[in-house]
Amino acid sequence: MERALSKYQVRLALLVTDFLDRHRRLVRIFLRPMANAPLLRRYLWVGIRGFMGASAFDCHVIDAAEGEVDFGGVKETFYPSCLTMVMRDTLVREFGEEKAEEVIRRIAREAVHMEIKFGMEGRWFPKRFLAFAGDPSALEAMRSDPDLLRLVSKGLALTNRFIHDEGGYGCIRVDLTADPIRMTIDNSLSARLAGRSARPVCAASCGMMEGAMSYMLGRDFRAEEVECAAMGAPRCVFELREATAS
C-alpha cells in the first residue's frame, strides 16, 4: 500500500486526536463552537469538525428552497425509523423471511457503498488521509503498523458515529485487529424493531458493514451475525470475512 502520510504525520495526528480525547471539556466548550461557527464551518472538512466535537446534525447543510440535505458531499433525506419496519414486513410478505433478509442486505450494502464513496470523494477527510481506500493490501499494511491502524480506527470510529450511532441505528464498534474483523452493535435498531426472534434479524446492519468495508479495504466482504440482541444476547455481534467466489 502506497502511503500518502509519513510516520511523523501519522504520529502528529495521533498526538492531536489523543489530546482531544483526553480533554472533552475543552472540546465541548471551545472547539465545538469554533467547528460550528458560520464563517469557519464552510472551510473545514466534516471529519475535522467531528474531532472538534461537532455532531452529524451540526454537519448537515439543509437547503430548504432546493429540497436538499448535504452531508459533506453525501445527499440525504430523513425518514421515521418505522419505515425500516414497514419495508421489512412488506418484503417478508412478498418474498418470505429468508429472501427478504437477503434483499434488505443487498439494498443496505449498495446504499452504504455509495454513501462512503460520495463521502470520500466529497469533504469528509483530507484526501491524504484516505490513500488506503480501495487498496486490497490496506488491511495487512495497517495491521503491521500500530500507529497507522490506530489513526485509521479513529477515523472509522468517527465515521461510524456520524452515520450509525447518531443515525439511530445503534452504537457500533469495529475491531480491525481481529481476524475475522469483528463488529458489535449495542441497541441495534433492527433488533429493537423486531423484538424477540428465533433467528438473527440485523440483515440491514450486515449489508451496511459489507458495503463500507468492501469499499474502504478494496475487497469483497461478507458479514455474519453470530449474536443478536433479538435472540436474547446482550448486544449484536458480527464477523466479517473476505467473500469467497461462488
Image (cartoon, helix red, strand yellow):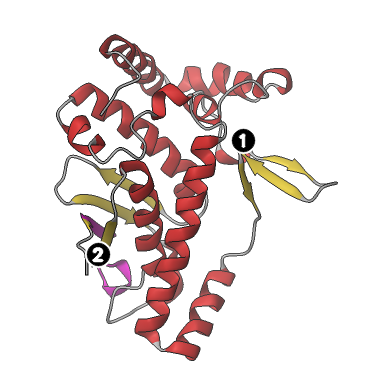
x, y (%) of residue 111? 50, 58
Residue at x 44% of width, y 88% of height: 95
Residue most toward the right? 65
Q: Assess whether residue 228 is covered by the magenta stretch.
A: yes
Q: Assess whether residue 169 is covered by the magenta stretch.
A: no
Task: Say which mark, if any, is on residue 59.
Answer: 1
Asked whether, in this view, residue 213 is left or right of residue 52, the answer is left
Asked whether, in this view, residue 45 is left or right of residue 165, the answer is right
- Dot 1 surroundings within 10 Å: few (below 14), some, or many (20 or more)? many
In this rendering, does residue 166 appear at all?
Answer: no
Task: Say which mark, if any, is on residue 170.
Answer: none
Asked whether, in this view, residue 178 is left or right of residue 46, the answer is left
At mark 1, the secondary structure is helix
80 or 223, nearer to the observer = 223
Residue at x 44% of width, y 71% of height: 104
Q: Which residues are magenta?
A: 224-241
Check the image and report above or below for 98 versus 40: below
In this rendering, does residue 223 appear at all?
Answer: yes
Kind of residue indicated by mark 2: Glu
Q: Nearer the viewer, mark 2 or mark 1?
A: 2
66 or 133, nearer to the observer = 133
Kind of residue indicated by mark 1: Cys
Residue at x 45% of width, y 85% of height: 92
x, y (%) of residue 22? 36, 20
x, y (%) of residue 121? 53, 36
Q: Which residue is mark 2?
A: 224
Q: CA distance from mark 2 to mark 1?
A: 32 Å
Residue at x 34% of width, y 19% of height: 18
CB contact under 8 Å: marks 2 and 1:
no
Quarter of the picture containing the N terminus is top left
Quarter of the picture containing the C terminus is bottom left
Occupied quadrant, residue 226: bottom left
